[in-house]
Amino acid sequence: MITYFDTSLFVKLLIDEIGSEQAEEIWNVSSTLGSSMVLYVESRAALAAANRQGRINDANLVKAKSILEGLHSQLYVVEVTSKLVKMAAELAEEFSLRGYDSVHLASAIFMKADVFASSDESLCSAAQANGFHIIV
């Protein structure tokens, strides 16, 4: 099973919150894991925001960044190319997606994933419309 992780679900592997256990289960049962290169920057931004908001302290931020590095190294990473960006732009228009969300969907299509794992409802709807099995 080739599973595409978007950032909304991936961050649950880094910060203990609602949905973290489910995210771990999905991660562990998948034979191949992938995501877009944008997952890295979005994850770092999410961790920094959690720290600023007091959801995680400085020590947990350092720990979460270390976990990010380890998990990211296990992913098949789809590079953001001009071809991918153009596909993402079409998907953004067709499904009313935000920019990075459309890049995630285009990346999943590019890597021929079987499963799209996300906690973003609108992105899941667009992924389902593109033939993916959805795990929320």
Image (cartoon, rainbow, N blue to C red):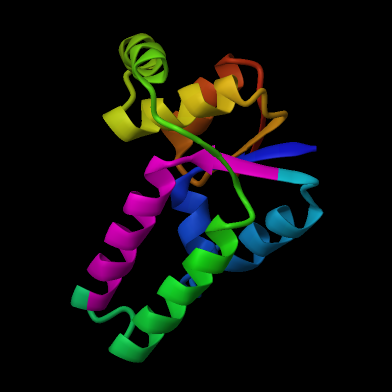
| Residue closer to the observer: 80 or 119 | 80
Residue closest to the far bottom: 59
| Residue closer to the observer: 115 or 122 | 115
For residue 88, say whether it is visible: yes
Judged by its main secondary structure, the magenta piece is: helix
Q: Determine which quarter of the picture holds residue 122.
A: top left
> Who's the residue at 67% across and 23% down the image?
112
Q: Which residues are magenta?
A: 33-51
Q: Position of residue 81 (x, y in %)?
A: 38, 23
Q: Determine which quarter of the picture holds residue 90.
A: top left
> Who's the residue at 38% across and 82% down the image?
62
| Residue closer to the observer: 5 or 38 | 38
> Who's the residue at 51% across and 55% down the image?
10
Q: Taking 69 as reference, is 32 above or below it? A: above
Q: Is residue 59 left or right of residue 117?
A: left
* Residue 43 inside the magenta-drawn segment: yes
Q: Position of residue 47 (x, y in %)?
A: 33, 67
Q: Is residue 88 left or right of residue 116?
A: left
Q: Taking 130 as reference, is 66 above or below it? A: below
Q: Which quarter of the rendered picture does the C terminus lie within?
A: top right
Q: Taking 104 as reference, is 5 above or below it? A: below
Q: Position of residue 39 (x, y in %)?
A: 42, 47
For residue 18, say whether it is visible: no
> Who's the residue at 49% across and 66% down the image?
69
* Residue 99 inside the magenta-drawn segment: no
